[in-house]
Image (spheres, rainbow, N blue to C red):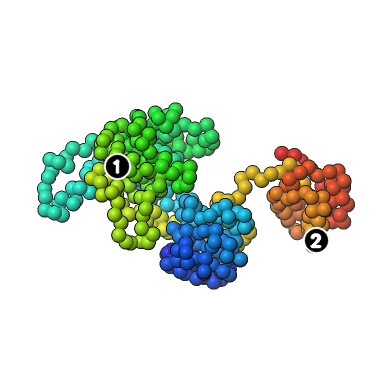
Amino acid sequence: MKVLLADSLPEDAVARLTDSGDDVTVMPDLDADTLPDHIADHEVLIVRSTKVTADTLDRAGRLGLVIRAGAGTNTIDCGRAAELGIYVCNVPGKNALAVAELTLGLLIAVDRHIASGTADLRAGIWNKKAYGTSQGLFGRRLGIIGVGDIGIATAARAWAFGIDTVAEAKPERSHLSVARAEGAGISFVASLDELLSTSDFVSLHVPGGPATTHLVNQEFLAQMKPGAVLINTSRGDVIDEPALIDAMNTRGIRAGLDVFADEPAGGSGTFVSALAQHPNVVATHHIGASTEQAQDAITDGTIATVEAYRAGSPINCVNLEPLPRREATLTVRHHDRIGVLAGVLAILRTASLNVSTMQNQVFAGSRAAVATIGVANQPSPEVVDEIQSLPDVIYVSVTTP
């Protein structure tokens, strides 16, 4: 396959794709404006932070797969990709440990004044009295917002510090997700209000997008304890930055931040931010996933995603219909011969029965197979009889969800 790598990944990733017979083009300097001019003829696009717009997708005639070599896909027009039948897949959970480690690092740095103390030492200033006023972490409460892989990994590490970790109880959480969270030491409180008003530290682990933009606003910050610590290693636009600055000025809120709303597009550049420069902030340069361990894991996940697509079974797709419209399922046992399924599909087309899902499994010996076909409407008895009458069909059954 022709693969375009429009971001930087380790050289090992390129070598492994090339060894699999792929034609790999590496153009890490592409951006949203220049990517459309280079997408033609490529079947797979791999990105990290590069924005994938509708224009890029519209000009990609052969493209079938876009991989976000990371978790968030908010920089990709997933809706347009779905309209064009292009899979958008991510590599979730691979950077969870790295981000969790940074989260705890920022929390310790805020509590122990590490950044300010280091700056003073470099300036030749010794001020043990000023920097000996930390509160300590043991026995304090951490409220985690977002209990996916990163939130759970953060909670597990906070438990080792003796921190009481809580999250908001939500009725839509599955039993499995609740069990995972509780296994990491998380207990649940009734509401976000209770989480904010009782937590000494609040850590954000939510995806970007319209649903979380300015989640941390004036009302959110007003519910936090005076002097509480806010940690954000998720997305910059989750925080209303002027509101946070006001809360730091008026209520002593402190913050450990790895992300900002208007970061430079490249890996380096000038960045003037009133929030980053505030004395109550300890900050890093969006490096949450930037460890060798995390990059190796992301590389492995990216390669696995390409291989799954090559095998016809894409993994971690974010733009598929979770529950395709299906009113009936046809189970067709048939002889494994050429043209059987073509005949079945021709009958369904004539009857205006749209196929929503389909799977064909071949039995040992390759003499028989079973096709499971989800259709959007109930097939009539006449349609079932017509399929049953096909020469190589053994038996047809119809079930409803």
Q: Quadrant of the C terminus?
A: top right
Which quadrant holds residue 232?
top left
- Amino acid type of disc 2? Gly
Q: Position of residue 357 (x, y in %)?
A: 69, 49
Q: Position of residue 349 (x, y in %)?
A: 79, 53
* Crowdedness near tag 1: few (<14), some (14–19) or many (≥20) residues, C-alpha within 10 Å: many
Among the two numbered marks 2 and 1 on one chain, the one whose residue lies closer to the N terminus: 1
Examine the rendered structure and indicate whether residue 354 appears above or below residue 44.
above
Q: Quadrant of the N terminus?
A: bottom right
Marking on residue 16: none
Give the residue number, with chain letter if any, for mark 1: 245
Examine the rendered structure and indicate whether residue 327 appears above or below residue 300.
above
Q: What's the residue at 76%, 44% (across, down)?
A: 377
Which quadrant holds residue 185?
top left
- Amino acid type of disc 1? Ile
In-image side of 283 versus 370 (left or right) = left
Which quadrant holds residue 168?
top left
- Disc 2 versus disc 1: nearer the observer: 1
Question: What kind of element bears circle 1?
Answer: helix
For the residue pair 126 and 389, the one nearer the viewer reads as 126
Examine the rendered structure and indicate whether residue 16 appears above or below residue 83.
below
Task: Report whether residue 157 is seen.
Answer: no
Q: What's the residue at 47%, 31% (across, down)?
A: 169
Q: Position of residue 115 (x, y in %)?
A: 22, 49
In-image side of 382 versus 148 (left or right) = right
Give the residue number, with chain letter if any, for mark 2: 339
In-image side of 357 versus 254 (left or right) = right
